[in-house]
Image: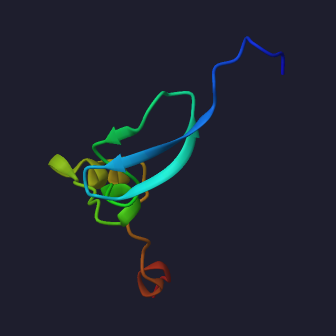
């Protein structure tokens, strides 16, 4: 890297609103406060729920034939 053209890359302390804190490196000057982190975000903690509003998933599966697989008894002619 050329000297004098890159910003300083120093260690900073990241603090979340949930209280979790960790150190990383950044070009940002000073500590950083964030509202949500990987420790409290619903996607990463597994608490996120997928909401099927208005039956969109069921409608998609019916339209494209990806619904429940037919049972083997129904598939064999008698």
Which residue is pictured at 33% across the width and 41% down the height?
A: 34
Quadrant where the N terminus sits is top right
Q: Is residue 17 above or below residue 48?
A: above
Q: Horizontal placement of 23 versus 43: left or right?
A: right
* Residue 16 at x, y percent in the picture: 32, 50
In the foreground, 70 or 3: 3
Q: Is residue 71 above or below residue 19?
A: below
Which residue is pictured at 26% across the width and 60% down the height?
A: 49
* Residue 70 at x, y percent in the picture: 42, 74
In the foreground, 38 or 30: 30
Which residue is pictured at 22% across the width and 53% down the height?
A: 52
Please count the marks in the image: 0
* Residue 19 at x, y percent in the picture: 28, 58
Which residue is pictured at 44% across the width and 87% down the height?
A: 73
Which quadrant of the view contains residue 39?
A: bottom left
* Residue 31 at x, y percent in the picture: 41, 38
Residue farthest along the left direction in this orientation: 54
In the foreground, 43 or 71: 43
In the foreground, 61 or 32: 32
Residue farthest along the top direction in this orientation: 5
Q: Is residue 51 visible?
A: yes
Quadrant where the C terminus sits is bottom left
The way the protein has been coloured in the rendering is rainbow
Q: Is residue 67 visible?
A: no
Q: Horizontal placement of 41 versus 52: left or right?
A: right
């Amino acid at each position: 890297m050329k000297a004098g053209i890159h910003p300083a890359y120093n260690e900073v302390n990241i603090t979340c609103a949930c209280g979790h804190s960790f150190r990383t490196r950044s070009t940002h000057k000073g500590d950083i406060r964030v509202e949500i982190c990987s420790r409290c975000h619903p996607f990463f903690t597994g608490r996120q729920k997928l909401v099927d509003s208005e039956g969109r998933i069921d409608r998609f599966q019916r339209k494209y034939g990806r619904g429940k697989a037919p049972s083997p008894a129904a598939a064999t002619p008698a």
